[in-house]
Image (spheres, rainbow, N blue to C red):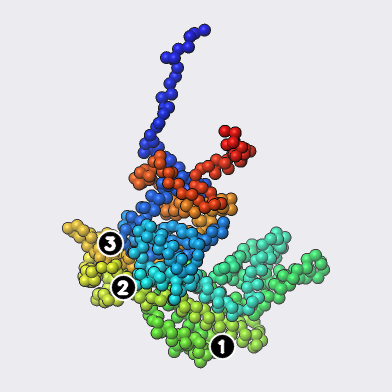
Amino acid sequence: MEKYNTLKQSRLETVGIEFAGSEKKAIDLKLAVYIACHSAVRSMDATFVIAPAMLTELVEDVGASGFSLIIDESTDVSVIKFIALVIRFYSVTDCKIKTEFLGFAEVYRATAAALYDLIKGFLDSVGLYRNIIGLGTDGASNLCGRNNSVYTLFKAEIPNIVLVRCVCHSLHIAASKAAMNMPAELEFLVRETRNWFARSPLRKLQYRDLYSAINNGKMPPALVQLVKTRWLAWAKAIDVVLAQWVELRQHFINHCEIEKNDPSEKCIISRKLKDSFTEQNRLHLLFLQPITEELNTLNLKFQATEVEVVSLFSELNRLVTWLSRKFLRPAHVPNLQEGEALTEEARQRLVQAIRNPQALLPVTMVDFGAKFAIHLGKITVSPAMLSDVQNRCRSYIATLTLGVLDLLPDHAERLCAIRMLHPDHALRLPRPNFLTLPLHLAQSGADVDDLKTEWDQLDLTDWKLYFGGSIPTHTLTFWEGVAKYEQPGGGRAYSSISDFALRVLSLPHSNAVVERAFSVMNSIKVKARSRMGAELLVAIMRIRMRLAGRGCCAGFKPSADMFRRFTADMHEALPRERPGEENTADDGEDDEALHLLGFDADDLWEDA
C-alpha cells in the first residue's frame, strides 16, 4: 500500500474570507429586486440596501423644487391602519413631472393633530417638509375640513398651500346623495338581476337559450356587478341591463310561470325582480344612463396619470353648466366661456337658484335625455306615474348639481388661471397679462421681475423649429421642452418661468395614485403573509412602484449608493418588529421551510 503523500492532497484554494466584488454584489441586488417585484417573500437586501437607496434617490431628485403631497388612509389585511404618502413633482433627472410613492406611516390615532404630526415627522425625516405647494386628499373631514384638519394645520405654516379634494371620491359622494331621490327598488333591480345568475349555471343556460332565440343566435352581454362603495359603477351596469331589458323581463316572467307548477322553483327574489321590470323603472334608468356616463367619463379623466391638468378643472365647470341647463330657467344658468371658472359669487347665486322653486323649469320642460323622450313617446303611462318619475328625476339633477358645486376647490378661480400656461395662451399675441398667472404658487423668494421678463419674451423664440416642426398641444410637454431650452452662449434661457410653470403643474388632481398604492399593498400583504412587518412592506412597495414605469426588474441597474450600503454590517442596525409581527431577518423563513419539510424547528435547535 502506497504511503499517504500530503503533497498529492488537493488543496481548497477558496477556503477563508472572500471579499465580494461589485459584480457579485450586482448579481445579488438584481436578484433581490426580482424577488421584491414578483414575490411577497422577504429579502434583507430589499429592506436595508435597495429600498433606502431608492428613497434617497427620490428625495435628491425632488431637491429644492416644490411638490404636491397626496395622502389617504387604508387598513391592511392584518387590520393595521396606514396613511400613504405620494408626491407629484418635476424631476430634474428625467426632465418631466412624475408621481412617486414616498412611503407609509402607521396610524395610531386618526385625529387631525395626530395625522399632521405623523406626516410632518415623516417629511422632516427625509428633508421635504418646507417645499409642499399642494395637498391632495379624499375629502375626509380630518384631512381637509375647514376648521381643524391636516390641511388647516399645514396652512398655518405654509400659507400658500393649495388644497385639492379628490374629484373621483367627491363625484361618487355627489352621485350617491343624488341617488337617494330614485326609487329604492331601482338598485335592487340592477344588483339582484346580476346576482340571480351569478351562482346558478342552470339559470345562465336557460337565459342564454332565451336570448339566443330572440336575437338570432347571439350570446347575451355579461351583466356587471355593482360595487357597494362606488355608485359610479352604475354607468356600465345600467347600459347592460337596458341593452337586454326585454329578454331579462321575459326570463323572470317565464320563471314565475314555472313556479306555479313546480314548488321547488319558488323564489321570492324572482317574483320581486319580475315586478321590478316596469316601464316606470325603465324610464328612470334611461334618464340615468347619459348622466352616469358623463360622470364616469370625467372620473376617468381625473384618474389618469398622463392628463392635461390645465383642462381638468374647467371640465368641472362645464359639467355644472351642462346639468344646470337641464332643469333651470335660462336666466339662472351660468354663461361660461371655454376654460372660464365659476367665481365664488356666481357659485353662490347658482346654489340659491337651485333651492328656489321659482327658478326651476316645469317638469314638462326639463331635459331628461333623448332616450327618455323617445321611449316615453312609444308607451302609455298614467299622468300620476309620469309626474312621479319626472319629479324624481328633476330632484336627482338638482341634488347632483349641488354636489358638484360643493366639490369645486376653494381655489377654483385661481386653479383655472393655470390655463394661461397652455401653449395656445402662453404664446398668444398680444401677450397675455402677466398678472393673470397664479403667482401665489411661485417659489418663496422668486424674483417676479425675472418671471415677467421671461414671460414677455417667450414668443420671441421659434418654438416650432425647436420642437421639430410643431408646437406641442400638451401643456406639460411644452413646458418640459421650454425648461431644457438653452441660450446660444449656454445656460437655460427660460429657467425662471419654466421652473414656475412646472411647479404649478405639479399640483395634484386626484387620489387615484394612492388607491393604486393600496392595491399594491393588498397584493403583497395577503392572508398567508399577514404577519409581515411595516418596514418590509414599505420596502417591497417602494421597489415595485419605483420600477413600475421603468421596465420592472429587467432594466434595473444597482446605483453607487446601493453598492456602498451593501456591506457585511448592513444588518447590524436591525430594528425589532412589534410583538406578533415577523422580523425582517431570515430565521422565520428558515423555520417555515423546515415546517414544510416535516421538521420541527424548535426540536432541531434543541438537539443542536
**Amino acid residing under circle 2:** His
**Amino acid residing under circle 1:** Thr
Residue under numbered circle 3:
483
Q: Is residue 538 left or right of residue 56?
A: right
Which x, y percent locates residue 588? 54, 44
The secondary structure type at the circle numbered 2 is helix
Residue under numbered circle 1:
364
Which x, y percent locates residue 301? 45, 67
Identify the mark at residue 440; answer none if there is no mark.
Answer: 2
Question: Tag 3 or tag 1, which sits nearer the N-term?
Answer: 1
**Amino acid residing under circle 3:** Ala
Which residue occupies the extreme front position in the image? Answer: 606
Going 30% across and 60% down the picture, which residue do you hit?
Answer: 64
Residue 250 vs residue 20, the one in the foreground:
20
Identify the mark at residue 295; answer none if there is no mark.
Answer: none
Which x, y percent locates residue 520? 50, 56
Which residue occupies the extreme top position in the image? Answer: 1
